[in-house]
Each structure stands twice: as C-alpha cells, then as structure tokens.
Image: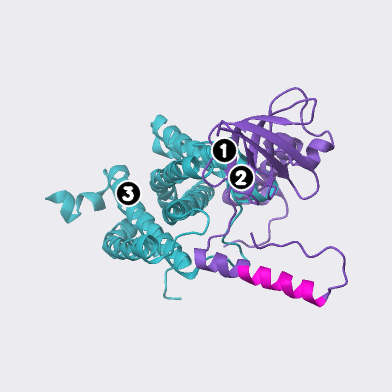
C-alpha cells in the first residue's frame, strides 16, 4: 500500500509535524480551560454538603486522571523504545515525565487544600493518597534516573524499566478506594455512569479535555527540544532553517 | 520477512524476546504486589468498622481509627462547648466516642466520620482526632432537598399503606 504508517515514527519527520500541531493544541486547550473553569466557578451550583469548597474538583479530578493516564502512556512509550529500539519512543517517554509529575503534584496539592477544610486534615496516610504520592516519586525517579546516566541510549533503557515496573501502581491508585477503607471518597464517575449534577459534569469534562490538550501541546514542544538536542550532530538538524540562522 | 512461526524462545527475534520478557516481568510483578497487598490488608486500610472492633480485629492497647456514620441524634455537646459525645455506627454495631476539640465542617449526623483514639475498658473511645469523610455525591442543595422530600413522601405513603404494623416507619425527615 502507498500509505506508510510509520512515516512519523522517525524524529526527522515527526519534528516538523509536531511543530505544526503545537499551536492547534495550545489554542484549543486555552479556550477549553476558559470555558470549563467559567462553568465550574460561575455556572455550576454549590454542593449540598461542601458548599463552595467542592469547586476544587474541577482542577483536582482532571489533574489526578491525567497524572495516572500520562504514566501509562509514558510506560507504553518506554516499553516500545525498549522492545523495538525506536529512538522517538524513548524521547516521548522522557518528554512526558515532567508533565505527568506536574499533574501528580497538582493533584496532591489541591487535595491537601481540600482536605483541610473538608476532612479536618491536610494529609492522612490512606491508600489513595499514599499511592498517588508514590506515583509522584515514580515520575521524579524516572526523571532523576534518566538524568544521572550520561549515555542517552543507556539512560533510556534503565529508566524504561523503572517506568514499566511502576505502571503496576496505577491500578492500585484507581482501585484503592474500593479495595480498602480510605478517608478519600469513592469514585463519582464510574464506568456505569454518574449521579453528578449536569453543570458540574460539563465543567469537569471540559477541564479534563483542556488538560489533555495542554499535555499534548507541552509534550510535543518538549520532544522537539529533545530531538534537537539528541540529534544535533546529524545533517538534517543542521539544515533546518531555525538552526542555520 | 519471517518464514516460519518461531517454535521456541531461541528462534524468536530479539525484539519479540524482549516483548515476552517485559510482559512476563510485569505480570509476575503484579502478582507479587497483589499478594503483598493482600497480606497487608488490615494495615493498608485506614480504619476499622465498629463490627470489626467487636470481632476483636482491631488492635488492643494502642491507638487506632474507627470509621462509620455518626448516628442520628447521638451528638451531645458538654457545657464547655468543646467536648463532644457521639456514636459511630455501621448500622450493625456502634461505639460511643468522646472527643475534645474542633470538629471539621462536614461533621454532621448521618454522615461519614473517622475517629482516632483508644478504646478503654468501659468500651468508650477517647478520640485525639476526628475527621469527616464525605461521600462521592455532588448535588445542588435544591436537588438534595427534593431527594429528602421524596424519601419522606415515600415513607409516609408506606406508613399509610400499612397502618396495622406496630412501629411506624422511621421518620427520615429531619
């Protein structure tokens, strides 16, 4: 067939494609953030128990979902890099890690801000909170391990192993509220549906999509820098207009 | 590319070997972690239910947490305004709790609570910390009111339908 499915799996072609896609993802992310946060902070009604405090879910929940999802994507890319020895996969894994760590941190931080007025404690060592903290440490460990090995190919392989092993933690985070007694409440959004107020749902899903698009835009920008850095000795990089000038 | 299906591990391409190895390693690790967490069951849980306490599953002589609902109508404040008495229940067994301090905003009768402290010989828990546990429901106040009214109406209808039954249906309107 004429279509080459793997055309954009090479850094050479992907670099240009990523550059073209970034503005689209960035602009739509900004728009959706504005819409979602407006619905969440202005349109959505107060909660019958938690009053205005509940509004932190519009940041807390999308950040938590993204922190778990990005970890699986990162581990997936790391595994692809390990199995097929593709350069771009490992670069993608490296590019995703800081954004994932950011979302894990936002999730923990907003959770603490919520916990103090609602539960009466900034932090408790329950299964949900602890496993999310481990997720943050896995991200930081991945970044640190990658940075501590000079040879990028060896760094890729070592950190890929850590990423793959750590992916066992993600289902633990998700099911922790089901498996054990936790202070953290159970899932509101279940696979079988949700009982949430419609405006609250709209706000949460809009911000979730916005976070998603933000993550894609930032990861693409970061992977472009990684490509430039790692392939700096190749001819195609030195022939790029932005490099030559 | 490949002429025949690989029969053994030695016939496989390196990348297929790596793939199988990674899948096997992750599966093995998941099983190991699962077993460890299963063994740690009671240590991973944040609190014990009153039923577990009555079944002697909770630790003796040291501080632990009890979780459940604050029994309706059980909250009593002492004259000093700080000491609070209430009952934690799981609708099966109940435990009386005494706590001196500031309660979280969400602490209400009929809602989730987690108290940490020691259970003394008299069966009372002297709590050092009381945390509120909110549920996964998010509703507008009007929706919550409508739900309550519907429940009360249902209860009234049930009571009217069976006037002969001796104890009246518990009034949920509160």
Q: Which chain is disc 3 placed on?
A: A
Q: Which chain is disc 2 placed on?
A: A
For label 3, the crowd category at 10 Å Cα-Cα, with few meaning under 14, some 14 to 19 and many 20 or more, is: many
Residue with the mark numbered 2: A168
**For marks 3 and 1 on the same chain, the one whose residue lies earlier in the sequence:** 1
* Colour given to chain A in the rendered image: cyan
Mark drawn on residue A222 = 3
Disc 2 is placed on an element classified as loop
Name the front one of labels 2 and 1: 1
Which secondary structure type mostly characterizes the magenta part of the structure? helix
The part of the image, by quadrant, that contains residue B67 is top right
Q: Are marks 3 and 2 in contact (CB under 8 Å)?
A: no
**For marks 3 and 2 on the same chain, the one whose residue lies earlier in the sequence:** 2
Image spot of residue A179 (x, y percent): 69, 47
Q: Are marks 2 and 1 in contact (CB under 8 Å)?
A: no
Name the front one of labels 3 and 2: 2
The part of the image, by quadrant, that contains residue A209 is bottom left
Image spot of residue B49 (x, y percent): 74, 42
Image spot of residue A200 (x, y percent): 46, 64
User: Which residues fall within the magenta stretch?
Assistant: B149-161
Check if residue B160 falls in the magenta segment: yes
**For marks 2 and 1 on the same chain, the one whose residue lies earlier in the sequence:** 1
For label 2, the crowd category at 10 Å Cα-Cα, with few meaning under 14, some 14 to 19 and many 20 or more, is: some
Disc 1 is placed on an element classified as helix
Residue with the mark numbered 1: A130
Name the front one of labels 3 and 1: 1
Q: Is residue A184 left or right of residue A67?
A: right
């Amino acid at each position: 067939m004429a279509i080459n499915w793997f055309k954009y799996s090479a850094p050479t072609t992907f670099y240009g494609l990523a550059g073209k896609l970034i503005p689209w993802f960035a602009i739509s992310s900004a728009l959706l953030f504005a819409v979602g946060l407006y619905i969440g902070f202005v349109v959505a009604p107060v909660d019958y128990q938690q009053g205005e405090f509940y509004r932190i879910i519009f940041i807390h929940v999308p950040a938590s979902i993204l922190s778990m999802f990005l970890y699986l994507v990162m581990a997936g890319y790391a595994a692809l890099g390990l199995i097929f020895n593709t350069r771009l996969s490992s670069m993608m894994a490296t590019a995703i890690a800081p954004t994932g760590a950011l979302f894990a941190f936002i999730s923990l931080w907003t959770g603490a801000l919520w916990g103090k007025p609602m539960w009466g404690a900034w932090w408790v060592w329950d299964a949900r909170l602890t496993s999310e903290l481990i997720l943050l440490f896995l991200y930081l460990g991945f970044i640190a391990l990658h940075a501590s090995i000079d040879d990028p190919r060896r760094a890729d392989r070592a950190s890929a192993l850590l990423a793959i092993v750590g992916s066992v933690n993600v289902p633990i985070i998700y099911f922790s509220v089901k498996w054990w007694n936790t202070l953290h409440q159970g899932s509101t959004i279940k696979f079988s549906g949700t009982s949430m107020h419609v405006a609250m749902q709209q706000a949460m899903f809009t911000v979730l999509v916005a976070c998603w698009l933000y993550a894609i835009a930032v990861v693409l920008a970061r992977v472009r820098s990684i490509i430039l850095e790692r392939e700096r000795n190749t001819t195609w990089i030195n022939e790029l207009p932005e490099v030559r000038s | 590319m490949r002429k025949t299906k690989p029969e053994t591990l030695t016939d496989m391409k390196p990348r297929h070997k790596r793939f199988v190895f990674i899948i096997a390693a992750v599966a093995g690790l998941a099983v190991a972690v699962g077993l460890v967490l299963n063994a740690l069951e009671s240590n991973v849980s944040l609190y014990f239910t009153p039923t577990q306490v009555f079944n002697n599953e909770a630790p003796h002589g040291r501080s632990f947490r009890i979780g459940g609902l604050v029994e309706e109508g059980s909250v009593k404040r002492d004259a000093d305004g700080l000491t609070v008495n209430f009952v934690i229940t799981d609708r099966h067994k109940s435990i009386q709790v005494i706590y001196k301090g500031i309660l979280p905003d969400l602490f209400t009768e009929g809602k989730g609570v987690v108290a940490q402290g020691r259970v003394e010989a008299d069966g009372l828990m002297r709590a050092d910390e009381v945390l509120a546990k909110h549920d996964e429901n998010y509703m507008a106040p009007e929706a919550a009111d409508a739900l309550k009214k519907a429940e009360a109406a249902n209860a009234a209808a049930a009571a009217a339908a069976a006037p002969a039954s001796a104890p009246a249906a518990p009034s949920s309107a509160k």
